[in-house]
């Protein structure tokens, strides 16, 4: 498969240099092209299709809900499906997060969270607060809207829009494989990364810092990277010490993706606001949410103005909420989160064999949210040059094998660095994991031979 131009039609595709095979339908872990070719969706689109494609129960539920009620505006009405979905989300979140503000996706959710944090301080301090800055991290992605992009630490995504963006501070990620401190253990990396948060708060002045945002397991910017749980223990202590709202971005890692209901569970993390989207509805409808604690809700809605100055047309769409609730119900009933943990451990065990290929530098992750980083030299961790297009070669070679991975780059210095995310549906079977691995190994073998110019046996 070679890279050509995008199809000529009326669609504004994101990448004019990609071929866009036309998909006819989806079944389970598979996407099926119009030519009948079957592709294992090893990334669930972008960690979205958590229960796979073509679920008949979801389709029937959606039909019934559409016939009953499809749209109401949350500024005037409520519907049972909105309330049921909110209750289930709360039950999936860390203890103390009790109030769900619905939106349409991840970028809206993270932007909602920082508005929530800002309004909290405005209401609490009688409109005299100077707290507005949000500390985030390099090698992070929090969304594409201007607020969420201001928090994003992925240079390639920010560069041309930089004049529009807020000057939010950034600190180093808990990226152990490429940690800047020379730390030998994940725990040491995690502690040093947390110390950077305190230093950055003091550098800007605690009176100016409203929030800190982090993913528990990094998504597209450095797939699968995660800290030792001591990181989030220290983050909680630091945020409490300096009166800073802690926002956990679980847009990609939540909804069962890492083998827990929310990835925060792995780390016993206690955020003030948690944001979720993507797998929340398994892609059957656009939805996201920001979930806050009683302190934030009561300060704004009970003791304060009683009006959150923010909103979207499709916030709290009853159809989307109903579908998301149905997806979570299916995940609970079928024990898919337990399956995710089991199959994730099994897949990581199989992936260890890929270190035999000299282009494989690091394999990391939780559950079925796994990253593989590619290098030119395993010993020195030297990355490939962008011109070598390793992530593109892996993608194309995977497609030829009938495997879809989620490629990315820039994790080394904002420009160089090739990696893929593996995030298949969390109801994948052991036999399907074996098939996924076999196809992936063939794609990596072929890519290794292409980029190093040597036969691999």
Image (cartoon, helix red, strand yellow):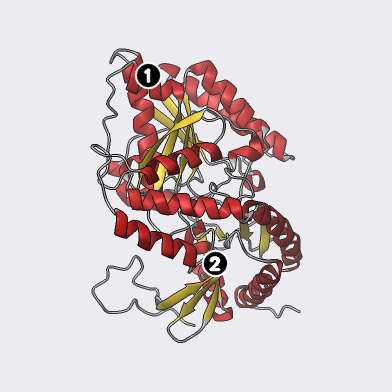
Q: Residue furthest bottom?
A: 35
For discs 2 and 1, the disc positioned in front in the rendered view: 1
Say which label, 2 or 1, has the lower sequence index: 1
- Badge 2 local density, few (<14 within 10 Å), some, or many (20+)? many
Above or below 106: residue 41:
below
Q: Is residue 233 left or right of residue 46?
A: right
Q: Position of residue 210 (x, y in %)?
A: 41, 25
Mark 2 near mark 1, Cβ–Cβ under 8 Å?
A: no
Q: Position of residue 171 (x, y in %)?
A: 51, 35
- Badge 1 local density, few (<14 within 10 Å), some, or many (20+)? some
Quick one: 386 or 120, which is closer to the camera?
120
Quick one: 195 or 10, which is closer to the camera?
10
Q: Quadrant of the C terminus?
A: bottom right
| Location of residue 260 by image quarter | top right
Instruction: Name the secondary structure under disc 2.
Output: loop
Q: Residue at x 41, y 23 (%)?
A: 296
Q: Residue at x 53, y 80 (%)?
A: 38
Q: Position of residue 221 (x, y in %)?
A: 51, 51
Would you say residue 453 is visible in this rendering? yes
Which residue is labeled 1 in the image?
Answer: 299
Above or below 253: residue 299:
above
What is the C-alpha distance between the residues marked 2 and 1? 44 Å
Instruction: Name the secondary structure under disc 1.
Output: helix
Q: Residue at x 59, y 38 (%)?
A: 264
Above or below 247: residue 128:
above
Q: Position of residue 228 (x, y in %)?
A: 68, 37
Which residue is labeled 2 in the image?
Answer: 405
Q: Residue at x 36, y 30 (%)?
A: 116
Would you say residue 152 is visible in this rendering? no
């Amino acid at each position: 498969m070679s890279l050509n131009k995008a199809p000529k039609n009326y669609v504004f595709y994101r990448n004019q240099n990609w071929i866009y095979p036309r998909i006819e339908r989806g079944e389970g872990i598979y996407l099926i092209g119009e030519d009948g070719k079957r592709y294992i969706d090893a990334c669930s689109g972008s960690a979205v299709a958590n229960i796979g494609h073509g679920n008949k129960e979801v389709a029937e539920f959606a039909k019934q809900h559409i016939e009953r009620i499809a749209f109401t505006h949350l500024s005037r009405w409520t519907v049972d499906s909105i309330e049921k979905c909110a209750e289930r989300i709360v039950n999936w979140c860390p203890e103390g997060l009790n109030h769900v503000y619905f939106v349409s996706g991840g970028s809206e959710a993270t932007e909602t969270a920082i508005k929530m944090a800002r309004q909290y301080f405005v209401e609490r301090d009688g409109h005299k607060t100077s707290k507005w800055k949000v500390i985030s991290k390099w090698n992070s992605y929090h969304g594409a809207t201007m607020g969420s992009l201001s928090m994003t630490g992925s240079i390639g995504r920010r560069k041309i829009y930089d004049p529009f963006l807020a000057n939010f501070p950034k600190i180093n990620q808990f990226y152990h494989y490429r940690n800047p401190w020379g730390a030998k253990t994940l725990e040491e990396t995690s502690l040093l990364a947390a110390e950077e948060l305190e230093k950055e708060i003091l550098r800007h002045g605690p009176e100016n810092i409203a929030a800190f945002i982090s993913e528990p397991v990094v998504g597209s910017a450095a797939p699968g990277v995660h800290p030792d749980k001591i990181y989030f223990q220290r983050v909680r202590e630091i945020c409490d010490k300096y009166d800073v709202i802690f926002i956990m971005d679980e847009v990609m890692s939540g909804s069962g993706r890492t083998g827990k209901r929310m990835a925060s569970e792995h780390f016993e993390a206690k955020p003030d606001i948690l944001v979720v989207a993507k797998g929340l509805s398994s892609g059957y409808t656009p939805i996201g949410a920001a979930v806050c604690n009683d302190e934030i809700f009561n300060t704004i809605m009970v003791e304060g103005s009683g009006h959150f100055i923010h909103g979207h047309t499709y916030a709290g769409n009853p159809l989307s909420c109903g579908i998301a609730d149905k997806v979570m119900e299916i995940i609970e009933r079928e024990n898919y989160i337990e399956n995710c943990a089991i199959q994730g451990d099994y897949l990581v065990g199989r992936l260890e064999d890929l270190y035999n290929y000299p282009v494989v530098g690091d394999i990391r992750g939780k559950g079925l949210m796994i990253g593989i980083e590619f290098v030119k030299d395993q010993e020195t961790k030297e990355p490939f040059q962008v011109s070598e297009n390793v992530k593109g070669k892996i993608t194309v070679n995977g497609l030829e094998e009938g495997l879809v991975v989620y490629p990315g780059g820039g994790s080394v210095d904002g420009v160089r660095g090739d990696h893929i995310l593996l995030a298949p549906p969390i109801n994948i079977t052991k036999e399907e994991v074996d098939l996924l691995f076999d196809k992936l190994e063939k794609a990596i073998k072929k890519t290794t031979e292409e980029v190093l110019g040597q036969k691999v046996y």
